[in-house]
Image (spheres, grey):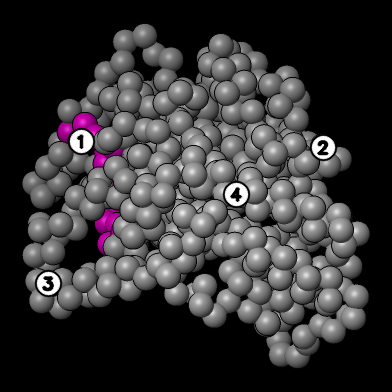
């Protein structure tokens, strides 16, 4: 891992903290400060001209950098404020029918997604949440068994957020394709830490974000749309950014009769496209975007692409295995899979008073988080070291043994 240590200087927080929570918020690259200053300077000196000089097309610029990470063609990744919004855009391309109205997901998916899917029942969908296994994984076999010809949408996480368990996305998507269901793959906990190839997986849609392993900060979620589907997708959650000529301000530009009568079905035999929409991924977008977020995303994406996800995965596997060996050495337990091919970038360590341990660690500049019921989540990235793994585990053992928790002050909602 010596070749990766040269990147440590690019992340200022590493000089003052053992930063081990990149599955929640990736460390900020040094260049990001300059990029955000460039945004401020553009606003200060160019004003509204910033839109025509760069800002309007920045979703494509950032989306194409993400496309390189996830194995997508250029022009197929649109940008959104968060993954819930990106999921809603994908869902808005679909409608339930008498014979096909079920949404299938897993109880181990991120709760925001399940809240969204449940809300779609008001639009006529039915929701099937496949229960978790006793070890807090999701069974590929049980998920596949829930997917049949009545299924409209299969939406699932590539990597589970609590346990970092890698789902068999190829098997699930393949079965969904055979029965005619649309797939939405959530790559939030996989993009940037394990290899992802949405083209090879043949996903209809894939969502994710730059917040975590891509070191791009909040406000940078993305939606991949399969190229042939992109040509005919008609999201009802739309807006002016999706139009070929938005500054014509022409409310008659869309063929409303066409939209009403021919809402897209990914399995349609005679796809049609709305000529008023852009032909690239920006036709999946809606209102005016948050430009500062795009500036924040640039440096992290450039670094991830420079390092390469395969090299990141190699380093991550070594560090997660080191973490698990220390878990065993100290007599703790972990919900993390012991199969390295099924474990992504996080090892959750279950210790007594895990929430208090996590807060104590953060107060001492060992930056982690806590998730019930798995305990303290430790998520090293390529910029971390084996020495830091050993230090954080020794600190956990010391806190748990001596019960010397940091207390005082109001407890935050954030854990």
Is disc 1 in contact with disc 2, using a CB cutoff of under 8 Å?
no
Which residue does the image show at 58% across and 34% down from the upper left?
A: 155
Residue closer to the observer: 144 or 313 = 313
Q: CA distance from mark 4 to mark 3?
A: 43 Å
- Identify the residue under disc 1: 278
Residue 299 x %, y %? 33, 60
Frontmost residue, 223 versus 148: 223
Quadrant where the image shows the N terminus: bottom right
Above or below 308: residue 376:
below
Against 5, residue 142 (above or below) is above
Q: What's drawn in magenta, residue-wise?
A: 276-294
Give the residue pinned by disc 4.
316
Disc 2 to disc 4, C-alpha distance = 25 Å
Mark found first going from the N terminus, 4 or 3: 3
Q: Secondary structure at mark 4?
A: helix
Determine crowd level at label 3: few under 14, some 14-19, many 20+ residues with C-alpha closer than 10 A.
Answer: few
Location of mark 3 (residue): 47
């Amino acid at each position: 891992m010596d070749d990766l240590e040269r990147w440590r200087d690019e992340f200022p927080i590493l000089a003052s903290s053992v930063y081990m929570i990149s599955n929640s918020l990736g460390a900020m690259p040094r260049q990001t400060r300059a990029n955000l200053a460039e945004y401020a300077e553009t606003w200060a000196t160019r004003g509204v001209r910033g839109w025509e000089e760069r800002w309007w097309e920045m979703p494509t610029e950032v989306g194409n950098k993400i496309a390189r990470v996830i194995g997508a063609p250029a022009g197929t990744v649109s940008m959104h404020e968060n993954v819930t919004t990106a999921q809603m855009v994908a869902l808005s391309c679909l409608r339930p029918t008498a014979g096909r109205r079920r949404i299938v997901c897993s109880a181990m998916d991120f709760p925001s997604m399940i809240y969204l899917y449940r809300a779609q029942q008001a639009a006529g969908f039915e929701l099937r949440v496949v229960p978790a296994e006793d070890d807090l994984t999701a069974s590929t076999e049980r998920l596949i068994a829930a997917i049949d010809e009545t299924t409209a949408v299969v939406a699932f996480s590539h990597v589970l957020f609590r346990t970092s368990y890698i789902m068999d996305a190829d098997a699930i998507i393949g079965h969904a394709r055979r029965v005619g269901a649309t797939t939405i793959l959530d790559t939030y906990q996989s993009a940037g830490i394990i290899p992802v190839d949405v083209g090879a997986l043949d996903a209809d849609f894939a969502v994710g974000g730059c917040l975590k392993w891509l070191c791009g900060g909040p406000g940078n979620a993305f939606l991949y749309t399969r190229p042939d589907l992109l040509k005919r997708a008609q999201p009802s959650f739309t807006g002016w950014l999706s139009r070929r000529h938005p500054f014509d301000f022409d409310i008659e530009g869309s063929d409303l009769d066409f939209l009403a009568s021919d809402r897209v079905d990914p399995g349609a035999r005679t796809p049609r496209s709305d000529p008023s929409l852009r032909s690239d991924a920006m036709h999946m977008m809606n209102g005016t975007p948050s430009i500062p977020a795009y500036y924040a995303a640039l440096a992290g994406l450039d670094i991830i692409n420079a390092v390469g996800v395969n090299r990141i995965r190699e380093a991550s596997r070594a560090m997660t295995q080191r973490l698990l060996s220390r878990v065993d050495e100290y007599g703790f337990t972990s919900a993390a899979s012991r199969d390295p091919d099924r474990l992504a970038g996080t090892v959750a360590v279950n210790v007594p008073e895990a929430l208090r341990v996590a807060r104590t660690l953060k107060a001492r500049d060992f930056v982690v988080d806590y998730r019930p019921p798995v305990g303290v989540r430790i998520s090293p990235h390529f910029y971390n070291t084996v020495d830091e793994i050993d230090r954080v585990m020794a600190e956990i053992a010391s806190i748990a043994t001596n019960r010397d928790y940091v207390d005082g002050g109001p407890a935050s909602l954030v854990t």
